[in-house]
Image (cartoon, rainbow, N blue to C red):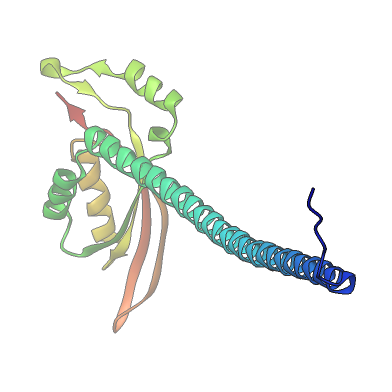
Amino acid sequence: MSTSVNLVPLVCLHARARAKRRNTWTFLTLGAGVFVLSVWLVSGTASSAVNSASRRLGEAQARQLALNHELADATGARTALIDQLRLLSDLQQEQPWARRLAVLAAEIPPGVVLTQVTVDARALRSPASSERNTSAAVAGPAGRRQSQPLTVQLSGVAVDHDELARLIETLRRSEGWGQVELTRADRRPFLNGLAVAFQLQCESREATP
């Protein structure tokens, strides 16, 4: 039978135990501090990233809204241009103005100057008028059909009333012009003398194949 004797004093044992507990708490405290610091850093980084992403999203939405407005404006301008081109095409099909104005310029009396030619094309703007144009087309000589007449206003200056009368007679004899009416004629100062400022209203009808 053997007997063991503890040679380490009890006070030393207690001191070692307290040192171990102190070290353990120190490590736990440091670990908790490191964990809290990491969480705070991650949270700050995430918040900054979220704010930056929100800002970029707002800027992208603002750019998208501006692009939508520009697209709407471009679409409106395109629609208006298409309407103008369609109206111009209808006018060219109904009334060959280039040839007509060339003939008028060749036949106009030398003492008359035209300053404005205005065509009332409202009849071509509405679908109902287009239907009336189609239904009103009648057969003419040699298989030609007459287009729907348009109201035309001619403004200009004549040397005297005789030249103005010659212009009216020329229009009445010319093919494609009808119901020529004088709506205004008065003498006004022109250059170094007086001239007759006039305004005519007539109907334009062009025979088309």
Task: Locate residue 22: give its quadrant.
Answer: bottom right
Left or right of residue 72: residue 13:
right
Point out residue 93 in the picture as x, y percentages from the top left corner.
22, 33
Residue 99 visible (yes or no): yes
Point out residue 103 in the picture as x, y percentages from the top left corner.
13, 47
Residue 202 visible (yes or no): no
Rendered position, 5 above or below 68: below
Rendered position, 6 above or below 144: below
- Residue at (89, 69) in percent of width and height: 10
Point out residue 51 in the picture as x, y percentages from the top left corner.
63, 63
Near-viewer residue (58 or 173): 58
Task: Locate residue 187: give its quadrant.
Answer: bottom left
Looking at the rendered structure, the number of numbered marks drawn on it comes to 0
In the orientation shown, which residue stands out farthest toward the front? 1
Left or right of residue 134: residue 11:
right
Image quadrant in which the C terminus is located: top left
Left or right of residue 2: residue 182:
left
Near-viewer residue (165 or 178): 178
- Residue at (41, 35) in percent of width and height: 125
Near-viewer residue (146 or 168): 146
- Residue at (18, 49) in percent of width and height: 101
Point out residue 69 in the picture as x, y percentages from the top left corner.
51, 53
Near-viewer residue (160 or 37): 37
